[in-house]
Amino acid sequence: NIMKALRTKIGTYAVVLLMSCGFTVPLMAGSSDFAGIYGALTGSAGGAQVNGRHVSQDGEISEGKVGAVFPVAGYEVGFNLPLGDLFFLGAGHSWSKSGNASIARGDGDSKGGSPESGGSAGNDSSFHLKAKNLSEVYIMPSISIYDNSAIYVKIGRTIADTELTGSATGDPGNLQGDLLGIGTIAMMENGLFIKTEGSVTRFDDIEIIGVGGSTDAKVQGTPDMVMGSIAIGYKF
C-alpha cells in the first residue's frame, strides 16, 4: 500500500531527523528566534486515494481504489513556545479550500464493479464525492538547527466537509483523520518566514449508501491524503 508506506517513511524520517539534529546543532541556533504568534498563507498540491469496495444490491462485492490530484490554498495561525535553548513546541490551526478533491466516483450502470465504477443491478450509479474545506489542528515538536532555521514534526487531526452529487443518497458526512508530517521553517530578520512541509492523513472509514437508488447498494472505503505545501507568513 503506497499510502501506508509513505506514512511509515515520514514517521521514521521525522524521528531520525530530530534525534540526529539534537546531537549536531551549532551553538548559534536558538528557539527564541521562532517564539511568538504567527500567521501565514499556504499553497499546496494534494493527492487523495480511497481503498475500498463496492457492494451491489445483490450482495456482490468487488474491490478497487480511486484517486485524484488537486490544488489547495488557505491560511494557518498558531504560536511557538520555547522549551529550551534549541527546542520549541508549536501549536496551530489551518484551513484550506481544495480545488477538486475527488474522494470517490461512480460512473457505471453495470451490475457489480469497483468503487469507481460502482453499478447496481442495471440502475444508473453515477455519483461523485468531493472533500472540501480542509481544517487541521496540530502540534509541532520543533528544533532550531541553524540561526533562523528549524525542522519540525507535525501531529494533528484533519477534518473535511464532503459533497455528494449524483445517484447516491447517503453522504458519509465529515471526513476525520490523523495527520502526520515533517517540515522546515526559515525565518527572516523582518519577521517573515517560509515554511515547507510534507504530510499524510489517514481518514476514518467512510460509507456511501443508496448507490443507484438501491438502499442495499453501497461503497465503503478508507481515504488517504498526501499533501506537499509551502507557506509564507509573519511572526508577530
Image (spheres, rainbow, N blue to C red):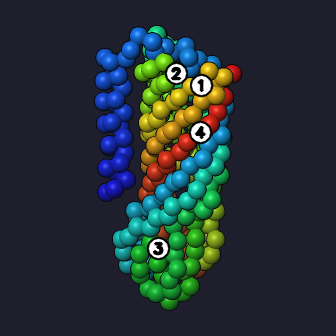
User: How far apart are the alpha carbons under marks 2 and 3?
Assistant: 47 Å
Q: Is 94 or 16 nearer to us in this picture?
A: 16
- Residue 142 screen position, x and y as percent: 46, 24
**Left or right: 62 in relation to 127:** left
Report the amino acid beneath label 4: Ala
- Label 4 crowd bin: few (<14), some (14–19), many (20+), radius 10 Å: many
To which residue does mark 2 refer?
148
Which mark identifies residue 188? 1
Which mark identifies residue 116? 3
Q: Are marks 1 and 2 in contact (CB under 8 Å)?
A: yes
To which residue does mark 4 refer?
231
N-term mark: 2 or 3: 3
Q: Is 113 or 210 nearer to us in this picture?
A: 113
Report the amino acid beneath label 3: Glu
Q: Are marks 2 and 4 in contact (CB under 8 Å)?
A: no
N-term mark: 2 or 4: 2
- Is residue 2 shown to the viewer in this render? yes
